[in-house]
Image (cartoon, rainbow, N blue to C red):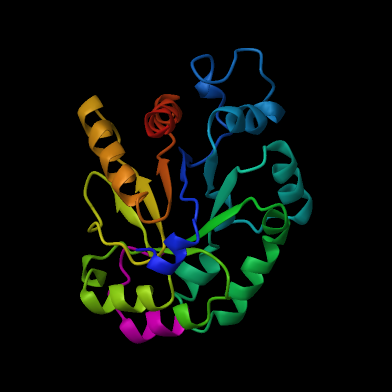
Amino acid sequence: MLSAERLAMGHSRKIYAGTSGWAYATWKPDFYPTNLASAKFLQYYAARLNSVEVNMTFRRHPTEKLLVGWAGAVPEGFQFAIKAHQSITHFARLRGVAGATVDFFASLQPLREASKLGPVLFQLPPDLKCDLPRLEEFVGGLPHGVRAAMEFRHETWFVRETYELLQAKNVALCLAESEKFGTPDVSTADFSYFRLRKEEYSAQARKKIAKRVSEAAKHGDTYAYYKHEGTPDDALYAEALLKKMD
């Protein structure tokens, strides 16, 4: 939750919504126009949605040229949430990665300079059980002045001690859900991060999501990403969520 001091300063809280990616020709014609070239997908996406979660950075390090191009294709206020590289989360499993983490954030500088860098998501392997000393070492090595979110995929992490470590460093607990798994609705930072990964979302389910997002937005900026699939449904759901929040 935001402190009373920050609220008194008039901090503008905003809702960002989108999907996990944009380069999908299968979104034609219901989201992208039929004749739209793939090189224009991001520009068009950003005209309807105000954020995207980038997953390609989990396997590949983005070049400066690529990031500058992305930043130039979207309007002011658009935010890129970036998934951290697997070398940090899956290979080293958060051990001894302070330098690599600082370097990863540094590689995103073109987005930061353009004021278009959102949170960086650190998704842990599903077999990595709760290890508080490991987590404390990792969050202690995060650079200052950045937004980071942790996605835990083993239920042993969901304990008070985990939340306290995240709160101490203003790191968000990623509120992720899938068909088999759900994160407790616990706020640990001055922003919130939702990953909506179920295969289908009924109108009733989307209404509940809107209520959760609206509640979270009372306390700080809120980021919500539907899972991308072969259809444009999730992009349309994200657009409807933004319109509902207006």
Classify residue 77 as left or right of residue 1: right
Query: Outermost residue toward the front?
Result: 8
The answer to whether any part of residue 3 appears in the image is no
Which quadrant, please, contains the C terminus? top left
The image quarter containing residue 234 is top left
How many numbered marks have been drawn onto this rendered protein structure?
A: 0
For residue 154, above or below residue 215:
below
> Residue 87 location in percent, x, y?
54, 69
Query: Outermost residue toward the right?
Result: 65
For residue 240, above or below residue 141:
above
Q: Residue at x 34, y 63 (%)?
A: 1
The answer to whether any part of residue 134 appears in the image is yes
Q: Residue at x 50, y 61 (%)?
A: 9
Q: Residue at x 57, y 24 (%)?
A: 25
> Residue 202 location in percent, x, y?
24, 27
For residue 24, above or below residue 28:
below
Classify residue 149 as left or right of residue 162: right
> Residue 110 location in percent, x, y?
73, 56
Residues 227 and 139: in front is 139
The image quarter containing residue 162 is bottom left
Magenta segment, which residues? 123-138
Q: Is residue 223 magenta?
A: no
Q: Is residue 130 magenta?
A: yes
> Residue 120 location in percent, x, y?
52, 60
